[in-house]
Every structure is written in C-alpha cells, then in structure tokens.
Image (cartoon, rainbow, N blue to C red):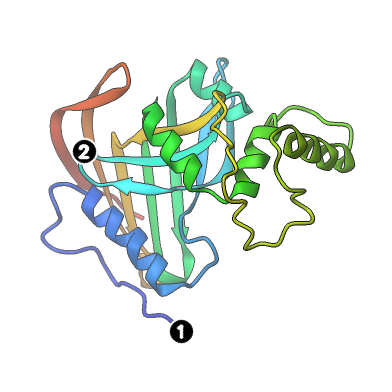
Amino acid sequence: MKARAQSLPEPLPDDPMPLAAAWLDHAWQQKTQRNPNSMVLATGDAGGRPSARVMLCKEIVADPGYLVFYTNYESRKGRELAARPWAAAVFHWDALGRQLRVEGPIVKSPAGESDDYFASRPWQSRLAAITSQQSAPIASRQALLEKLRETAARHAAPDPFQATDDDEATGLRLPRPAGWGGYHLWAEAVELWVEGEYRLHDRIRWTRELRSSGSTCSQTRSWQHQRQQP
C-alpha cells in the first residue's frame, strides 16, 4: 500500500499552485490509478443549473496559476462556458489520501497552444475530434463509426479500424478544427485537502483576486489562506 501524507506542510506556502502541481506530479509517479490527471469539472448554464463531467487536466501551470484542458467548444460544457465563463474542478487521489479543488474564471487557450497539443495527439484521436460533434445526438453507435470512416476517407487517412495502433500515418495532415481547443481555468480559489485519522482531515483554502482581460487573467491581490474544519 502506498504511504499517505499525514498533513499539509508547515509553514503553509504563500502560493498553493506549486504544491498543487507537485501533487499532480506525485500522483503520476505513484501510478495508483489509470488517469491520475482526471478531474471532475463543474460548469453552469445561463440559468445557473450545474453540470459536471470527468476531464483530463493536461497541465497545472503553477506560475501564473491555471489548469489546462481540451475539449470541443461546441459541446455542452463549451456552450455553458461561453455563457458563464467560470468553472470548478476537483481531483481526488483516493489511494494517496489527497484532494485538490480549484475554482475560477475560464479563458480559451491561445490558438497556437491548441494547435500544438492537437498535433501531438495520435492521428486516430485527431480524426475522432474532427468527426464528433460532441454532445449532439446521433442515431446509433454504428452511425458514429460510419461517420468516422467517412471523415477518414475525406482526409485520405487509413481506415482507423484497420490500421495498427503504432501506425503513424506519415504525412497525414489533420488540422485542428476551429470548434476544438483548450481552456485555461485560472485559480482564484484553491483548496488542498489531506485525509486524517478519525476524519479529522487537514484542509486549507487559498483565495486571491483576479482581473480578466480578454484572453488572460492577472492577479490583483496576493493569495490569502485560511484553515478550515473538515
């Protein structure tokens, strides 16, 4: 069994984001779960009704302090983020006895960043992203598979169901669709939680003020922290 952390460090860091990034790195190293970068992302629609789903966090950028994830901009979450550009995320590393919560404003990743990440994905995954109108209805699973084959034919790509996993499809050009890309979830509030005996968990919440300015955010007040009862 993996050793669990017993408490948060003393003295507490002024900025929680380097520690949050270190926790994610540690979870990758420990390999206690298949996707240690999985997080539940919660959004709200224009009427304030919430929805949540599991996403993969591709990076925690400790300085200046945001999470990076990618999705279809026209999906349900994308539409909700367009209407209310604010989100909350939670990571739960159960085997390590740790939890990380992040809340804050959302901005789209720069186009070049999204292009670079899209180009790094396996060609089959790029083909699927081009094909899928995420969250839109479709008649059947078979209809979706046929739609994928049609996309492959249109881009002169191999049949994804016949190609081997290690087939690199050299020279294949699959540019990022305009409706797919990244988001930055800027941390305005961060909670670090460590499991404790008898459910006396160690729990600290940091907050700061941010100012949104187009495609980025800037800090207007330094981090403040407060210990909370479990």
Q: Nearer the viewer, residue 179 or 29?
A: 179
Give me the disc on residue 138. Answer: none
Compared to residue 209, the image places residue 83 above or below, namely: above
Q: Which residue position is annotated with label 2?
A: 64
| Residue at x-position 66% and y-position 41% | 127
The answer to whether the residues at label 1 and label 2 have Cβ atoms under 8 Å apart is: no
Look at the numbered disc 2 and give the secondary structure of its residue.
Answer: loop
Report the side of 34 relative to 182 (left or right).
right
Residue 157 quadrant: top right
Compared to residue 64, the image places residue 166 above or below, namely: below
Q: Nearer the viewer, residue 127 or 44?
A: 127
Q: Which residue position is annotated with label 1?
A: 1
| Residue at x-position 40% and y-position 66% | 27
Task: Say which quadrant the C terminus sits in.
Answer: bottom left
Q: Nearer the viewer, residue 123 or 188?
A: 123
| Residue at x-position 41% and y-position 66% | 28
Compared to residue 124, the image places residue 24 above or below, namely: below
Residue 111 quadrant: top left
Q: Amino acid at mark 2?
A: Pro
Question: In this orientation, does residue 21 appear?
Answer: yes
Report the side of 62 relative to 87 (left or right).
left
Look at the numbered disc 1 and give the secondary structure of its residue.
Answer: loop
Q: Amino acid at mark 1?
A: Met
Report the side of 9 relative to 203 (left or right).
left
Within 10 Å of the Cα at label 2, are there few (<14), some (14-19), or many (20+) other Cα atoms? few
Residue 19 quadrant: bottom left
How far across and down, in percent of the image, does residue 184 sit? 37, 34
Q: Count of labels shown?
A: 2
Report the side of 141 relative to 180 (left or right).
right
